[in-house]
Every structure is written in structure tokens, then in C-alpha cells.
Image (cartoon, helix red, strand yellow):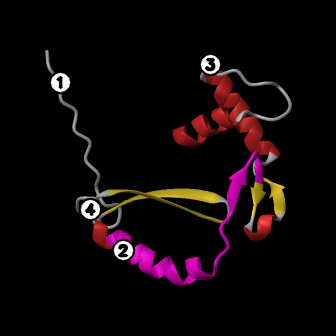
Amino acid sequence: MARQIVETFIDDLDGTAAERTTKFALDGQNYEIDLSGANREKLEKALAPYIVKARKVVQQRGVRVGRGGSRGSAAISREKTAEIRQWAKEHGLQVSERGRISAAVVEQYEAAH
């Protein structure tokens, strides 16, 4: 028996066909929204003046590093690490009770959420 599964993206704003899922973050909260090309362009245009003036933050070994290499606060809060550990255990992943959580486990967690 052959089976064909079709996944269709619908624009979350206007219900038209969406081209893809757009991810963005604000104040440490990550968001996703399915948008058509036109609505994504509107979002990009609205954010452009802020993005031009903003500093990029890159993740390096569990520590946030801003422009110029200055180290900021720990990338993952204590509550978040507890949540990741619980999720990892529920999904059969090896994770220690204390200490640093491997980047691979954190990436899997983030991909699932």
C-alpha cells in the first residue's frame, strides 16, 4: 500500500498559502510563525531599522558572546537546564544530574521545541 503525506503551510496572519516558517526571538523568548512571502517581507521591513542598530549575539560553549567578544550571562538558566534534563531523560538521552549539558542534547531539545 503506497502512502503520500502532504504537509501544507498556511499563513498564520491571513490564511493564504505560506512559503515557510519564520523564527525570531524577543527578550529571550523564541517564536515561530508560518508566513507567505509577502507577509515575511512586511515583517522584515518592520524589523529592519532595529536589526541594523542591534548587536548580534553568538552562542559559544554555553556562554553568550556579544559583539567585541565580551561575555554575558550564562546562556541557559537553572530552570531551563532542569527542563532540558527532564526532557532528555524522557526521550532516552544520556544526561548527567549535574554539570554542563552537552551541546548535542541542547540542540535536540531546541529542535523539538
The residue drawn where x is 73% and y is 50% is 60
Q: Residues within 10 Å of mark 3 (few under 14, many from 20)?
A: few
What amino acid is found at the position of numbered circle 2 in the picture?
Glu
Labelled pair 2, 4 in contact (Cβ < 8 Å)? no
Q: Secondary structure at mark 3?
A: loop
Which stretch appears magenta? 39-63
The residue drawn where x is 68% and y is 37% is 103
Of marks 4 and 3, the one in the foreground = 3
Residue occupied by mark 1: 3
Earlier sequence position, callout 2 versus callout 1: 1
Of marks 2 and 1, the one in the foreground = 2
What amino acid is found at the position of numbered circle 1 in the picture?
Arg
Residue occupied by mark 3: 92
Magenta segment includes 53: yes
Residue occupied by mark 4: 15
List x then y, in percent, for residue 29.
Answer: 63, 58
Q: Residues within 10 Å of mark 4 (few under 14, many from 20)?
A: few
**For residue 7, above or below residue 17:** above
Q: Residues within 10 Å of mark 1 (few under 14, many from 20)?
A: few
Earlier sequence position, callout 1 versus callout 3: 1
List x then y, in percent, for residue 111.
Answer: 53, 41
List x then y, in percent, for residue 9.
Answer: 29, 51
Q: CA distance from mark 1 to mark 3?
A: 30 Å
Labelled pair 4, 1 in contact (Cβ < 8 Å)? no
Dividing the picture into quadrants, the one containing residue 64 is bottom right
What amino acid is found at the position of numbered circle 4 in the picture?
Gly
Q: CA distance from mark 2 to mark 1?
A: 35 Å
Residue occupied by mark 2: 41
Check the picture and name the quadrant holding the C terminus: top right
Q: CA distance from mark 2 to mark 4?
A: 16 Å
